[in-house]
Amino acid sequence: MNGLAIHRQFIARSVLLAVLATWLVLTGFAVVGALLNEIEDFGQGDYGIGHALLYLALQTPRRAYESFPMAAVIGCVLALGAHAARSELVALRAAGLSPWRIGSTALLAVGALIVPLMLATETLIPAAEQRAQALKLAAMKHEVTLAGGANVWAREAGEVFNAQGGERRVVDGRTVLVFNQVRVFAFDPQGRLVWIQQAEEADYDETRGWVLRDVKRTTFGARSVAVEAFGQQSWATALRPGAIEASLQHPDLLSTSAIGGRIEQLKRNGLDAGALLDAYWARWFFPLTTLALVFAAVPFAFGQQRSGGFGQRLFIGIVFALVARLVQPMLVNLAKAYQWPIPVAYALPVLALAALGAWWFRRR
C-alpha cells in the first residue's frame, strides 16, 4: 500500500469516528427530548416508563436518520478542522495529498454510512416506527386498528370504498386485513351513481382478493331501483389495501416504494399527491443533500481553520447544517405554492452547494 493510500485511510478513519460520535450525541439529545414529551402520557392505561423506553427505542432509528445530515457536516468539519489546527493537513498536502483528494475521502467516508442508512429507511425504520405506534396505542388501551376506528376512504377508477376502520388478523397463518361497516359506491364515466354495496365486513388477502360478507347491493336503473342480498360476495377491483394503509399513515412511516405506490394510486384517480410527492423526493434527495452539505463545508477545514478552535469549527458545522434545513423546506413550500416541480426545489440547494464547494476547493 502506497503512502497516499495510507494517508487517505487516516483521513477517512478520523472522519468516520468524528461523524459517528457526533451522530450518537445528536441522536441521544433527540431521544432525551422525546422522553420528556412522553411523560405527559404516563398514566393513560398501562402506559409508563417501561413502555415509553421501549417506544423510544423503536423510534431511535428514525431519529438517527433525521439527525444524520447535521452529524455528517459537524463531524467532518470537526475532524478535518482538528487536523488543520495541528498542521496535519499541511503535512498531508506537502506529501502529495491535494485538497480535492482530502475532500473526496471525507465524502466517501460519509457515503459509507449513508448506504446502510438508506437501506434501513426501506426496511427497519418503517417497521420499527409502526411497531412503536402499535405498542403505545395498546399500552394506552386504545384500539389498535388501521384507522383508529375512524372513517377510511379510498378510490380506484369509478369505485369509492368506505369503511369504519379495520384491523389485521392472522387466519391459518395468513395475514388478513378486515374492514368493518363497508360501503362501495360505483359511478359511471358521466359521474352517475350506478350501484351501492353495503357489507357488515370485508376482508382481503393476497390469494383470494376481496370478499364482502352480509352484503346488500342497491342498483340504480334509469327508472328503477333493485335491491339484492348476499351472504358472501367477491369484489373484483384494482384497489389494494396497501394503498388504503398508506393513506392512513404518515409518509415518514412508509418505505419509498410504498410512498411511490400511493402516489400512483392517487394520480390514477385524479387526486392531489402533493404531500406524498414531498416525502418521496425528500427521501431520494436525502443522500445527495447530505453529501453536498459536506462537500461545501469541508473547505472551511483548510487555511483559516488553523487559527480557529473547537468552538469555531463546531459553529461553522452547525451553521451549514441549519441553513440547509431552513432553505430547502422554504424552496419546497414555494414550489407547492406556485406549482413548480418539487424535484427542482430539492435539486437547487444541492447544485448551489456543489458549485460553492467546487469554487472553494479551487481557491485552496
Image (cartoon, helix red, strand yellow):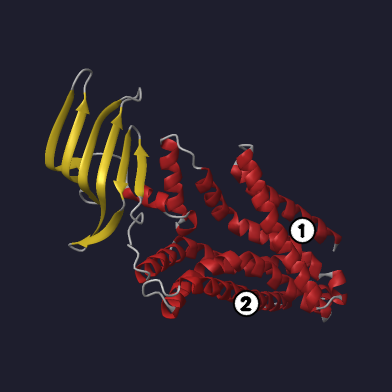
Position above or below: 79 against 121: below
**Which of the pair 51/241 is nearer the observer?**
51
Tell me, yes or no, if residue 111 can be seen here.
no
Asked which quadrant contains residue 124, the reply is: bottom left
Residue extending furthest toward the bottom: 86
Q: Residue at x 49, y 57 (%)?
A: 252
Marker count (numbered): 2
Q: Mark 1–mark 2 contact, CB under 8 Å?
A: no
**Which of the pair 337/118 is nearer the observer?**
337
Residue at which label 2 appears:
25
Q: Position of residue 304 (x, y in %)?
A: 87, 70
Helix, strand or loop at disc 2? helix
Q: Residue at x 38, y 66 (%)?
A: 137
How crowded pointer 1 is (Cα within 10 Å; few <14, some 14-19, many 20+) is rated as many
Helix, strand or loop at disc 1? helix
Quadrant assignment for the C terminus: bottom right
Position above or below: 251 against 84: above
Q: CA distance from mark 1 to mark 2?
A: 27 Å
Viewer-nearest of labels 1 and 2? 2
Residue extending furthest toward the front: 43
Q: Amino acid at mark 2?
A: Val
In this image, 137 relative to 25: left or right? left
**Which of the pair 256/169 is nearer the observer?**
169
Position above or below: 156 against 193: below
Asked which quadrant contains residue 21, the reply is: bottom right
In this image, 182 relative to 349: left or right? left
Residue at which label 1 appears:
357
Q: Residue at x 74, y 62 (%)?
A: 320
Residue 216's disc number: none
Q: Residue at x 29, y 32 (%)?
A: 186
Q: Amino acid at mark 1?
A: Gly
How crowded pointer 2 is (Cα within 10 Å; few <14, some 14-19, many 20+) is rated as some
